[in-house]
Amino acid sequence: MRIDILTVVPELLESPLNHSIIKRAKAKGLVEIYIHNIRDYGKGNYHQVDDYAFGGDAGMVMMIEPVYTLISKLCEERKYDEIIYTSPDGEILNQGIANELSLMENIIILCGHYKGIDHRIREHLITREISIGDYVLSGGEIPAAAICDAVIRLIPGAISDETSALSDSFQDGLLAPPTYTRPKEFNGWTVPEVLLSGNLAAIKKWQDEQALERTKALRPELLEERES
């Protein structure tokens, strides 16, 4: 998989994309991530990438020319499955979307910034808009990193124990059951006996029950979505 990220603040992506599972996936050759500074395609000596909004609204708007030039250059080199814009207007990122994106070969992620981007970019270049929640951030770099993390960990080989990802919360529409490790008793707090029994059928039954109960208590709307 190849992911190209377009941003005006590339420094914000250096740390989250160079550690942990993402770092190992890159080292194994499972994913390539390229960060492109949109300012390199900006106008004039100051590499301008934003301007005032038509209509007199407050805030600066990302200009169409540098974004168009960069996306066009990339698309001449290869075919992209999705050109994603990180926007609070987009569909909320969930496990289903992460699963879908993990099967793709080439993805562009355009990080929003300032007041937004010239809407013609969204009309003519963007194929999908994704949000990580109903709130506004200063830029799309954090959502871009979240998308990468959610997607890359699903690529076969990215996680040492591939079955681990299959038991994550939301994979089956439920929250994950509680997990424990040694010591089996600490400060008077004990691990459920069923997990120490070695009875795999009983453990699976307990985990399924716990997943359902936790979802009912913490995220009941997930059960409604599951049943609809």
Image: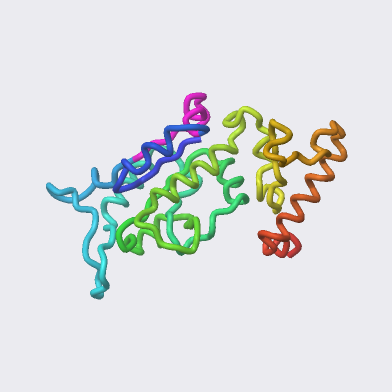
Most foreground residue, 8 or 202: 202
Rendered position, 222 above or below 164: below
Check the image and name the residue furthest to the left: 45
Task: Residue 14: name its quadrant.
Answer: top left
Question: As drawn, is 199 to the left or to the right of 224?
Answer: right
Check the image and name the residue furthest to the bottom: 55
How far across and down, in percent of the image, does residue 115 sit? 31, 63
- 228 magenta-colored: no
Question: As drawn, is 143 to the left or to the right of 65?
Answer: right
Question: As drawn, is 223 to the left or to the right of 31?
Answer: right
Check the image and name the residue furthest to the front: 187
Rendered position, 16 above or below 51: above
Q: Residue at x 51, y 24 (%)?
A: 28
Q: Quadrant of the C terminus?
A: bottom right
How far across and down, in percent of the image, does residue 124 sit? 40, 59
Most foreground residue, 60 or 196: 196
Numbered circles on residues, count: 0
- The boundaries of the magenta stretch are 22-35
How far across and down, in percent of the image, does residue 26 sit? 47, 29
Q: Residue at x 52, y 33 (%)?
A: 21
How far across and down, in percent of the image, does residue 225 sit? 69, 62
Q: Residue at x 49, y 48 (%)?
A: 82
Most foreground residue, 124 or 131: 131
Rendered position, 74 above or below 198: below
Q: Residue at x 60, y 28 (%)?
A: 157
Q: How is the image coloured?
A: rainbow
Question: As drawn, is 107 to the left or to the right of 58?
Answer: right
- 29 magenta-colored: yes
